[in-house]
Amino acid sequence: MALKMVKGSIDRMFDKNLQDLVRGIRNHKEDEAKYISQCIDEIKQELKQDNIAVKANAVCKLTYLQMLGYDISWAAFNIIEVMSASKFTFKRIGYLAASQCFHEGTDVIMLTTNQIRKDLSSPNQYDTGVALTGLSCFVTPDLARDLANDIMTLMSHTKPYIRKKAVLIMYKVFLKYPESLRPAFPRLKEKLEDPDPGVQSAAVNVICELARRNPKNYLSLAPLFFKLMTSSTNNWVLIKIIKLFGALTPLEPRLGKKLIEPLTNLIHSTSAMSLLYECVNTVIAVLISLSSGMPNHSASIQLCVQKLRILIEDSDQNLKYLGLLAMSKILKTHPKSVQSHKDLILQCLDDKDESIRLRALDLLYGMVSKKNLMEIVKKLMIHVDKAEGTTYRDELLTKIIDICSQSNYQYITNFEWYISILVELTRLEGTRHGHLIAAQMLDVAIRVKAIRRFAVSQMATLLDNAHLIASNAQRNGICEVLYAAAWICGEFSEHLEEANQTLEAMLRPKVTTLPGHIQAVYVQNMVKLYASILQQKEQAGEKEAAQEITQLMIERLPQFVQSADLEVQERASCILQLIKYIQKLQIKEVPVAEEVIALFAGELNPVAPKAQKKVPVPEGLDLDAWINEPPSDSESEDEKPKTIFHEEEQRHSRHRQPEIDEEELARRREARKQEQANNPFYIKSSPSPQKRYQDTPGVEHIPVVQIDLSVPLKVPGMPMSDQYVKLEEERRHKQKLEKDKKKKKQKKEKRGKHHRHNSLHTESEEDIAPAHHVDIITEEMPENALPSDEDDKDPNDPYKALDIDLDKPLADSEKLPVQRHRNVETLKSPDSEAPLVEKKIKKPKKKEKKHKDKERDKGKKKEKEKKVVEEEEEKEKKGEDLDFWLSTAPAPAPTPQPQSEPGMDTAVVAESQEVKKEVREEQDEEEEDEGRKSSKHKKKKHKKEKEEKSKDKKKSKKKSHHSEEEPPESVQNGTLEDEPLPPMSSYCLLAENPYIKMTYDIQGNLQNDSQVTVSIIFENKSTSFLKSMELNVLDSLNTKMLRPEGSSVHDGIPVPFQLPPGISNEAQFVFTLQSIVMAQKLKGTLSFIVKNDEGSTHEKLDFKLHFSCASYLITTPCYSDAFAKLLESGDLHMSSIKVDGISISFQHLLAKICFHHHFSVVERVDSCASMYSRSIQGHHVCLLVKKGENSVSIDGKCNDSTLLSNLLDEMKETLSKC
Amino acid sequence: MINAILVFNNHGKPRLVRFYQHLAEEVQQQIIRDTFHLVLKRDDHICNFLECGSLFGGSDYKLIYRHYATLYFVFCVDSSESELGILDLIQVFVETLDKCFENVCELDLIFHMDKEMVIGGMVLETNMNEIVAQVEAQGKLEKAEGGLSAAPSRAVSAVKNINLPEIPRNINIGDINIKVPNLSQFM
């Protein structure tokens, strides 16, 4: 026995190791497969040994072979053996092999659970690491469920090396076991602020990956990421976050608004191209999401486009490529900004790199306009010629067609030009896209009626020259165009000038070499042609000519009858018989043309591809209902089987064809015919009204510009489409001259009103009238077509399961399963947290709770409320928190903002800031000129946008002043539909010096009865850079600033941004209060560093923060009956004031109270209104406002008399200013 | 997410194959072949991105590759990765390989090196020093255990004896100039 073992190990010394294997494979280049199969046999022998080192060596070799494409799943069990070796060297090999070949289908994988758990809790960090890495590749739902808790524990491991691996593997666990997401999420979130940058980066990575799939669930993390973005210096993390923001902004445009500035700063400051590129990308995403709300971001767009231009002009092909890629994103929403770089894009078409050329092509697709289509296509055609013999040429071809046909041929002004482009494209040999060109020809000819005559003439020429196109028909894809040509000539044969010649062309023997489906179309359409020639000849009385043409058909058709293609054969023989019959009639001198032509009467209109899907189910039609009565019970004779049968019957009823007798069928057929006759959407055999309409004076009723048909199909030396380009240019020029003439006349009349505009006249889109009136027949759709149904998401999407609300607090049932094994190893974890399994799970819950407590330390009573309510509240609060973070202006309560203003909701901040500037900017405004836009440098431009905005506002203001005398109407909640109100800002000045101006607004927080938030807008008035701003206040007993944990009451709070010159930004500070019945003032200081060319200086600005009582009120709507009950309850104290000398209208007065004092109107009758509001601590405040002549009296009721009297005093002050 | 990391030589022979989603061996080899043919056609002075939706069956995927001397390093990534970022990552990878190439068996290194950088398709570490430190620590651990085989030097020489052409020393990616590592010991 011992001898055997010794012998065995000596043998083993001659085993190949991995290196031998590699060398062996290299030395056996000719018979590699044979050599490898020999090696595999050896490996199989080695795996049978008991020695673990031998096994590991064998597995190592297998891993290499797997990489070369050999299946090694048969060794799965041996791999597990090696994984469970105690030596790291072997373990590592085992896990490597497992990660290469294990997957969900590997059945032995379930044996690994305990081994992996043991390795995860190994004292050696590399054992743990190797297990984690392996797990990331082969985790299954079972493994994920069983190990989720262990991995989560590792997220708090003492070693960052393990922490970051655990964090990343959690993502894989979430994917396989979605239930783990919610319990693990709090800890994952914690890791975003891990001291180790690697762990932080891993957490960002995972959350970004999660958020990308289900962005809406992660919106609430936006503030946290925002903070990371402004603080992190790791470009890798920044890129991830910025990419994530790109995914979030479409869901929350307000977020985008907040992002623009820091991103713009980054774009200006970063030197890393990768970061710059991602910033530009996200700014683009923001602009796209904002494009509906805020049109004024041209400065940002310009910045992006400029930076991208720099990328595209770079010599580095990668940057060029990415620049073009990003450019195409801008193109979708801001085509104008991209169009100005047309030159650059066209240059890229010459690039040697095909990917870049394709990108440029994509861009061109979006850049075309009516004005430049012909020019761009001309350039592309030149490239088509150059690109002979490449697949790139096919790409060009499809692009040309795409560009021209996009949005229903929107940009084509001259279809003759387009047809000739298509004809030119038929000259391309060896293209795969003949069918595309054919489809276009058909589509244009069918849908653009006015072009048919021209199209038919071109197609006739094509048919005549078919030998050029179809030189080697079977291999050449371009012969597909003959399909279109034949159909067009047949269908619209009335436009054909030399029908005889075309018919002969179609009957040439050469045609039989064409593919079958094309021949079939030839055969069918030559009959159409024949029919129309017949009619023509008969009408002209040329009987002989008519007989000749019949004879020609009879002579030539047999070649098709002999065709090997069934379709061709069938059609040809059918038609041959028909024509023989016609010949008989002709010999009897019977006029037949009318009857023959009737074969092809009626017009074929295009039907929309979705038409069938969109036919609505008529009301009252139940498709699942029985058409006939189900077989009645009485028919069945046996009682017992009947019931069984009956049940069965019902189950299968839908598939069963009901038996119907002949009579019934006949009756139904009749009914259907009747129905069809009355149905305008059923294509009938009789000529449709449309057709008749067209048959009468032909197409002459369509205003067609005389087509110069003398332009020959081929002009030597010059492609035909160029002729059209020339013609078109001339036409446009003429048009322009005419227009200019007209304009000059107008100018004379109007006297210099537009002189600047006219002198700088450029052709705009609208100026180009199409060459002829084109009526594109739209595709037919059934009546009452259903609205297009969005494509449902793939139900198998693995990420769908992760669409989980993460803001809801954890329920008790939501725990990660913990296996309580007798296995002792589970408890021997190296880190302190592992031992108590139960404790671990509770931890995140506890955190959640702590969080809650912190947020409302006063409301302890509320905690006793029912759990459900709490959950709801929590959810709401989280949502509100985000809203709060995002909204940098008063909440969009029913405040009296003018309804007429566009983009109101999203523009709240900007507005409130701008209103302040209004006065200052008024002077500049006089000089404002719309034409100077582009030459101004960026800063000025920014300002200008704002000015334009405030201008709008001013207009509305002026209007409102005029309308003051209008009789007031009954209004609800202070919203006035028909009377625009002056804009109001709740921001008032806090302090100001030559460097900085601060304005502020205070908002109560409904969810927290002892907190208010002060939003301060910092505006840099200087030309220096302001940084390191820190705000501090002297707390009073009652009111304290909420400082971050760990800082003392004397510490200031840093303002989370820096201010470049002329920029303003907003920051929020939370204050806690005890009593809210009195107004209070807090002294404070803002310290900051002014940095300019001369150096930097420390500056300070003192201020007094005034907390009015109104700032503790929250606009709360109230119904009139609830209001009446409240007044009746009698718990309220009463007080009243009267203010004289009021001149503003009652509406405005109410609006002011609503806006500045946070009330809402409950009811209004004539010049009397009741109003309501609620304080953050739940005081009800009711007002009755009466307007007399020049005076207003306000009676108030409130739970607290001090609060009421203070509120009324404040109101008095506001009103006395009116 | 990174979907796959492929390293193969100028003849399309795989040197490192790592897929982060399970695919059958034949499919993997097919992808390697297709990828090889795609990148082979491209000369060194055109861009390093390739759209290859069809290759992996997802429209979102992109190939980002670099070609160093005789080796192609190809990363297949989806839209959540920054293109330029991945290019830098490949650079880090190659430089790390270069740094770690002493006294350790080559194949072993190739097999395990990527695991310190990318895990389950997600980037684990981008700091080269950290990666090198972890790889070396694990190498030491193995050494302490006596290693797998007794004759590593013989094997290394077996793979070293291959002539490499001259390598361009400086390649400009975006804004950074990177020294192209010497790969002569490698491959």
Image: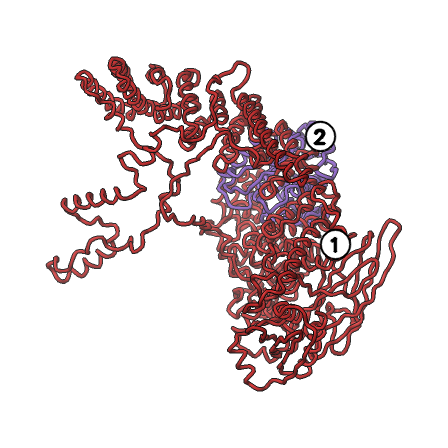
Chain colours: A red, B purple
Residue A560 relative to residue A191: left or right: left
Q: Nearer the viewer, residue A25 or A796?
A: A796
Which residue was labeled with disc 1?
A: A922
Q: Residue furthest right?
A: A1094
Say if B27 sits above or below A1022 in the image. above
Q: Quadrant of residue B160?
A: top right
Residue drawn at x 74%, y 36% is B179
One can see residue A162 in this view: no
Task: Assign a secondary structure to mark 1.
Answer: helix
How far is mark 1 from mark 2, CA to CA? 65 Å
The C terminus of chain A appears in which quarter of the rendering? bottom right
Which residue was labeled with disc 2?
A: B167
Residue A217 relative to residue A315: left or right: left
Find residue A321 and report its horizontal and vertical position in percent.
63, 36
Q: Quadrant of residue A8?
A: top right
Counting labels gives 2
Q: Are circles 1 and 2 on residues that touch, CB within 8 Å?
A: no
Say if A78 sits above or below A736 in the image. below
Find residue A763 and report its horizontal and vertical position in percent.
61, 33
Q: Nearer the viewer, residue A995 or B114?
A: A995
Find residue B116 and report its horizontal and vertical position in percent.
65, 48
Q: Disc 1 or disc 2, which is closer to the eye?
A: 1
Disc number for residue A239: none
Say if A714 sits above or below A1118 in the image. above
